[in-house]
Amino acid sequence: MFVILVYDVGQKRVAKVLKKCRQYLNWVQNAVLEGEVSDANLKKLKMELERIIHKDEDSVIFYSLRTTKYSSREIMGLKKGGDENII
């Protein structure tokens, strides 16, 4: 499935969250990642993020699309991030 992940976490946890998410998804821009991920790996990512974030202070949002057939992506301005996974 295709996933878009957006996060807003405390400054002390930003690097940890980004590093963990980049093991599964492609970094697009500040606090935004996307990519194809299996159901099992998505579940694993969520479990790992639960150990990092503080639920009373932080927010992580997952947008899941079964297919990208009817979606499009347009970039205006500077392209940040990359298309490769960093492990």
Image (cartoon, grey):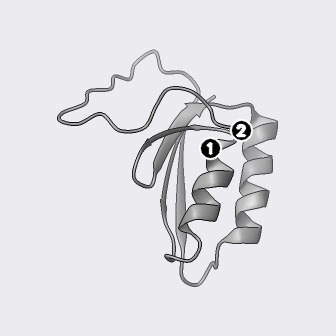
- Give me the residue at 56% from left, 77% from top: 12
Q: Is residue 10 above or below residue 2?
A: below
Neighbourhood count class around disc 1 (C-alpha, 10 Å): few under 14, some 14–19, many 20 upward: some
Find the residue positioned furthest to the bottom: 56
Q: Residue 49 in the image: x percent, y percent? A: 70, 61
Question: Disc 2 to disc 1, how far (Cα)?
Answer: 7 Å
Picture disc at residue 87: 2
Q: Residue 87 in the image: x percent, y percent? A: 71, 38
Left or right: where 58 falls relative to 77? right
Left or right: where 51 falls relative to 73? right
Neighbourhood count class around disc 2 (C-alpha, 10 Å): few under 14, some 14–19, many 20 upward: few
SS category of the residue bearing label 2:
loop
Find the residue positioned furthest to the top: 69
Q: Are marks 2 and 1 in contact (CB under 8 Å)?
A: yes
Q: Which residue is mark 1?
A: 22
Q: Quadrant of the N terminus?
A: top right
Q: Amino acid at mark 1?
A: Arg
- Give me the residue at 59% from left, 27% from top: 66
Quadrant hosting residue 77? top left
Q: Residue 63 in the image: x percent, y percent? A: 51, 44
Which of pointers 2 and 1 lies earlier in the amino acid sequence?
A: 1
Picture disc at residue 46: none
- Give me the residue at 63% from left, 49% from top: 21
Q: Is residue 54 above or below residue 64?
A: below
Q: Amino acid at mark 2?
A: Ile
- Total marks drawn? 2
Q: Nearer the viewer, residue 38 or 69?
A: 38
